[in-house]
Amino acid sequence: MKNNFVQKAYEVAKERYAAAGIDVEEALKALQKIAISIHCWQADDVTGFESIGNLGGGGIQATGNYPGKARNIEEIRQDIEKVLTLVPGSHRLSLHAIYGDFQGKSVDRDAIEPTHFSSWMQWAKEKNLKLDFNSTSFGHPKSGELTLANPDKSIRDFWIEHTKRCRQISEEMGRFQNDPCIMNLWVHDGSKDLTVNRLKYRQILEQSLDNIFTIEYKNMKDCLEAKLFGIGFESYTVGSYDFYLGYGAKKQKIVTLDTGHFHLSENIADKISAILLFTPEIMLHVSRPIRWDSDHVTILSDEVMELAKEIVRADALDRVHVGLDYFDASINRLGAYTIGIRATQKAFLQALLEPIGKLREYEGNGQYFERLALIEETKSLPWGAVWDYFCLENDTAIGEDIITDIQQYEKEVTSKR
């Protein structure tokens, strides 16, 4: 019965959008192609599977202790598989280096190899997933305040080797899946209090990056992630937004925009068109900053909607990669996954259903009242009916059905961990 209502509502919505000059079917085809890079670390609070180090520190902190977190590689995969049944479309999975299949062996980060991720590659192929990757500089005895920017050559070389190996792993992933693996590089390097050597550390970081990027690969893409500050690194961040923007433009590397890594008053959407002029592509990490980088679950906020609209308005869907990056341990972790993924998809659906042709016409003619009025009226068009139909067509949960589905999984699976 519910499916019949969804179908009827969709047909009415389709006609309403057609009257506004919008082709709903074309919008849905475009949405189907948008693959969200799902972050594996929401499933286990950024714990990972290595047997060295302590995963705290480095500006990383998962808050909360909701029962049922994944404890091993099998449980993470099980949870991800469940999440994929709750979100429409085909997606990607982003792994951190600490999530290798190490088989209980102690493998330090400067010794990781593609073989430690071969089971991930095979599993992803079976589940119709593509993989992305991240180097892991935090939570290690050699992390400290500085890694790639460390004046100590032995420490710096350790992290250079780690990052080089991460690029090798990414290359192998990309080759195996016949689709480029996006490798994100983020280091926490900085200072808790005042420093007088800002330039020195940035010069060292630049040299380390040049060393890391010596080899060119065909099956992976490098992206660089900045941060405003980190927990314990409040006064100074070596890899600031300005640093990586300059380096990315100079070296033609992808710049990563994490929506939680900027001042709360900054408009991240406005950065899209500016950066695309000077870098080949952009990587997005969509999060929800309550108080700066608090990594709350992504919701359908104005900020996320504006971000999606700017990407669509710039015709940049083929140049902007979309991933999630939050870790909320205070609520059901699968629920956090599902809410965030679906919210991001809903934002892109609304962006794709915008009458961009008419809006551009108004703007080109200097009809600014008309432009603003149409933007406002578009907000109340029946996009929700189109979203429900998208879920129906993808044979996934519709509306509030996700709640009972996740509750049942918690009862049968996660509550027994």
Image: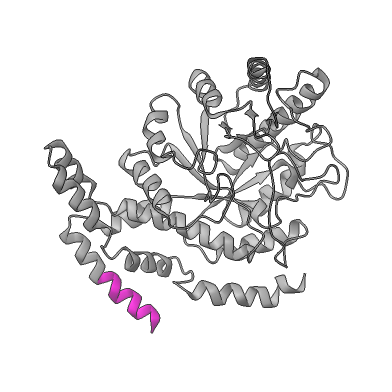
User: Which corner quadrant of the image does residue 171 belong to?
Assistant: top right
Question: To which quarter of the image does residue 43 belong?
Answer: bottom right
Q: How many marks?
A: 0
162 shown above or below 80:
above
Q: With 198 as the anchor, is 36 left or right in this view?
A: left
Q: Residue at x 69, y 77 (%)?
A: 412
Asked if the stretch drawn in magenta spans residue 399, the answer is no
Residue situated furthest front in the rendering: 194
Q: Estimate the x, y position of residue 266 in percent, counting from the top left.
A: 44, 38
Q: Provide residue 313's location: percent of width, then percent of height.
A: 31, 42
Q: Judge by depth and name the residue closer to the eye, 290 or 240.
A: 290
Indicate whether 230 appears above or below 42.
above
Residue 214 in view of the camera: no
Q: Which residue lies at the image location 49% right of the left edge and 75% below the top edge?
A: 401
Q: Is residue 148 above or below residue 321?
A: above
- Is 9 positioned to the left or the right of 340 in the image? left
Residue 229: image location, x then y, percent: 61, 35
Query: Viewer-proximal residue, 231 or 87?
Result: 231
Residue 29 place in picture, x, y as percent: 35, 54
The C terminus lies in quadrant: bottom right
Q: What coloring was used for the rendering?
A: one colour
Quarter of the figure with the N terminus: bottom left
Residue 200 appears anywhere in the view: yes
Q: Which residues are magenta?
A: 1-11
**Magenta portion: prevailing SS class:** helix
Say which residue appears at 77% left-offset and 58% top-offset: 72
Q: Is residue 2 magenta?
A: yes
| Residue 326 sits above or below residue 107 on the image | below
Q: Nearer the viewer, residue 151 or 168?
A: 151
Specify the farthest residue to the bottom: 1
Horizontally, residue 10 falls left or right of residue 146, namely left
